[in-house]
Amino acid sequence: MSTVESSSARDLPPAARVRRLAEHVGATVRVQGWLANRRSAGKLQFLQVRDGSGTVQCVGRKNVLGDELFEQLDGLSQESSLEVWGEVKADERSPGGVELQMAGARVVRAAAEYPITNKEHSTGFLMAHRHLWLRSSKQAATLRVRSRIIKAIRDFFDSRDFVNFDAPMFTPSACEGTSTLFEVDYFGEPAYLTQSGQLYGEAGAMALGKIYTFGPTFRAEKSKTRRHLTEFWMIEPEVAFATLDDVMDLAEDFLCSVVQDVLKDCRPELELLGRDLSKLEAIQKPFPRLSYDEAIEKLKELGHEVPWGEDFGAPDEEALVAAYDKPLLVHRYPHPVKAFYMKRDPNDDRVALCVDVLAPEGYGEIIGGSERADDLDYLLDQIQKHELPMEAFEWYLDLRRFGSVPHGGFGLGLERTVAWITGTRHIRECIPFPRMLHKIYP
Ligand code: 4AD
Ligand code: MG
């Protein structure tokens, strides 16, 4: 049934996207897409055609389509590609408020038997067919929201005079600890895939004032959790002269802005995903803020005994955020559990001037940030204590030698943010092709 017909697209009605069909009620248009589902009832058939922007029901009548085409469509397999045209009719019962009364159709290519059907499939099976699973309505909706989140992120920083400043992917040094480095052979020398653009972002902030990096970052995470990818995207603003308080204010404004933009433009997707919109509407300033010390006290009340000095585990974080309906900012963690570049609190030498933002509803840490150590001698000492190779950091130390200023920033994990906003339990569905422990196909 290879039936790419000779009639040229010019002879056919104008093409329209399913998402915009409501603007064409009464007009005759053509939809180009794939067959998502189909049923027939005597001389009528109902084709669900998806085009990537949405799905529309197309009603075909035998007396209009003719016997041959009617029969061809009747035997058509799921995911066959086709074009259908006809008049757009308002229909309140349809999801998009419209349906298409078919005047004609042509099959572009009939599909082989499609492996993903309406029955339940295991996650392993779906992940092995990720290239096809992406066509499912929920997967497509999640990725559409992801795309909108990326735009919202850029719009926020661009509108505040930040300069987009891209950090390199190949690096000679570790930013976030040496245990999760991916080593690559760089012309016979070891190099690493970047864990964070931050150190380069600091150079950018000294050159341009306010910057943000936005790109893929890599961590050889040995843990298999619903929050960890080995390749994920991070947005990292860095601001000269910013203190920890400035960093926290920025993170708060930023998250409010992103959630509002998504709520404005992605209601159909969020509704399709079954997201409770009231939870997103609640994301308004101010966000609760707790110091690590206060968080330890609060956890004790909740029956979670965390010895002072230890990092919180996922169950602790979940217990902590359960009391709030907004992101929770936890600041001033003990410095040994945090990165070498963070500034110490001058009022309490045991803690770093840092902040983690924990998403509501148990989606985990979405932001990590800090004020950076701006003193050369302190950093020299830290690099030694963390047993990092001094040669690889000489350039970074220059930033403290030549006009060092207080500065800070944060990193937002894109996929965790998508998981939170879309209400997706596992991060693997929040990036087109997830990379995880031992998982690199397709
Ligand atoms: O807290 P992290 O490690 O902070 C940094 O990398 C800083 N250099 C950022 C900065 O200050 N410029 O990572 C930042 C965020 C986390 O809060 C989390 O959202 C995300 O990146 N993240 C991951 N997301 C998915 N998979 C992983 N393995 C992740 N590791 C971190
Ligand atoms: Mg962190």
Image (spheres, rainbow, N blue to C red):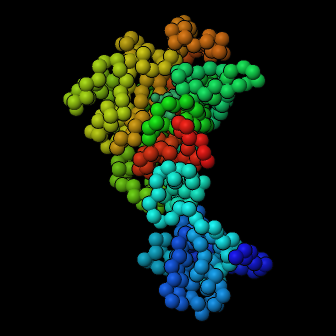
Residue 376 against residue 33 in the figure, above or below: above
Q: Is residue 157 visible?
A: no
Closest to the observer: 37 or 235? 37
- Residue drawn at 63 percent across, 77 percent down: 84
Q: How many marks?
A: 0
Q: Residue at x 67, y 27 (%)?
A: 184
Image side of residue 185 versus residue 299, left or right: right
| Most foreground residue, 350 or 194 | 194
Residue at position x 58%, y 81% in the image: 74
Q: Is residue 417 above or below residue 405?
A: below
Q: Measuring 46% from the left and 36% from the top, which residue is drawn there?
A: 224
Horizontally, residue 18 falls left or right of residue 266, namely right
Query: Where residue 199 sits in the image (x, y, percent)?
Result: 59, 23
Query: Quarter-wise, where is residue 67 in the image?
Result: bottom right
| Image location of residue 37, percent across then percent down | 53, 72
Quadrant housing the N terminus = bottom right
Q: Residue 88: which quarter of the image?
A: bottom right
Q: Viewed as shown, does residue 232 lie left or right of 321?
A: right
Residue 262: where, in percent of width, then height? 48, 52
Residue 406 image position (x, y, % from top left): 52, 18
Q: Is residue 199 visible?
A: yes
Give above or below for 363 relative to 263.
above
